[in-house]
């Protein structure tokens, strides 16, 4: 029988709900929650994090749908014109972080042209990249299609990324200022590169970014 520490590593590393919950999700979820509940583990910070992650993954499982070749999970954010969902390629290798991305769906058909411009901008930034690494902070364009009257784009994240809300949960009780400074320096480097490439953009707020604590990086979405 696995220990709490062993199960905690599996839960926190899980990329897909199907990996974790198997053929009987409700039974597996209940079993894992009983093992990992903070009350059974001295209310440790790790137990709180694992329990929160279990609830998040189980909620995703219940809201997963398929659109074309993409498996779409629950929303992870809301922008000015788009809803953003986490996706992975159906039938792909689920354990690879590279198989993950985000689906951006315009809430109004009138804004679909902005998603066309997003595709052009992303491809332009990658084409101009040449020898420098600024495009590490730019998603790759993967796919585009319509959902009803509204346009949708699928963008890759390349590595494990988190929304600001998820990042705050991950690094409780607070984020060290030096980590934020590193991330913001990378954002400023990216914006300087985009400006040199002739890109004009609107305001960029913390909610427009996905954060990579593993290398103090981020990706603009």
Image: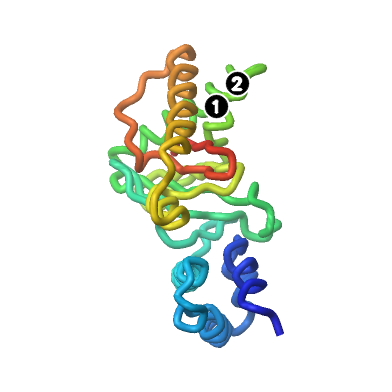
Q: Which residue is mark 1?
A: 123
Q: Tag on residue 127?
A: 2
Is residue 136 placed above or below 22 in the rendered structure? above
**Horizontal arrangement in the rendering, residue 98 relative to residue 86 (left or right):** right
Image coordinates for residue 108, horizontal then vertical, percent: 28, 45
Q: Which percent across, then down, holds residue 115?
A: 41, 36
Numbered disc total: 2
* Residue beneath the point at 28% across and 41% down: 80
Give the vertical position of 72 relative to 115 (above or below).
below
**Could you say which is closer to the camera, residue 48 or residue 72?**
48
The residues bearing labels 1 and 2 have C-alpha atoms spaced at a distance of 6 Å
Q: Are marks 1 and 2 in contact (CB under 8 Å)?
A: yes
Residue 160, percent from left and from top:
57, 49
**The N terminus - image quarter:** bottom right
How many neighbours does mark 1 have within 10 angstroms: few (below 14), some (14-19), or many (20 or more)?
some
Q: Quadrant of the C terminus?
A: top left
At 63% from the left and 74% from the top, the residue drawn is: 7
């Amino acid at each position: 029988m696995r220990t709490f520490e062993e199960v905690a590593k599996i839960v926190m590393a899980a990329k897909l709900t199907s990996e974790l919950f198997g053929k009987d999700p409700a039974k597996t979820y209940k079993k894992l929650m009983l093992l990992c509940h903070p009350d059974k583990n001295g209310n440790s910070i790790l137990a709180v994090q694992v329990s929160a992650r279990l609830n998040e993954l189980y909620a995703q499982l219940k809201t997963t749908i398929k659109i074309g070749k993409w498996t779409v999970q629950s929303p992870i954010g809301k922008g000015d014109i788009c809803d953003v969902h986490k996706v992975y390629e159906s039938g792909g290798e689920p354990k690879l972080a590279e198989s993950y991305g985000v689906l951006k769906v315009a809430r109004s058909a009138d804004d679909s042209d902005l998603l066309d411009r997003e595709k052009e901008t992303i491809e332009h930034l990658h084409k101009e990249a040449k020898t420098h690494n600024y495009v590490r902070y730019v998603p790759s364009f993967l796919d585009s299609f319509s959902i009803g009257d509204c346009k949708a784009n699928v963008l890759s994240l390349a590595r494990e990324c988190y929304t600001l809300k998820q990042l705050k949960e991950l690094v409780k009780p607070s984020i060290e200022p030096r980590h934020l400074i590193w991330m913001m320096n990378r954002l400023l480097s990216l914006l300087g590169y985009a400006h040199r490439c002739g890109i004009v953009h609107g305001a960029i707020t913390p909610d427009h970014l996905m954060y990579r604590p593993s290398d103090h990086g981020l990706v603009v979405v």
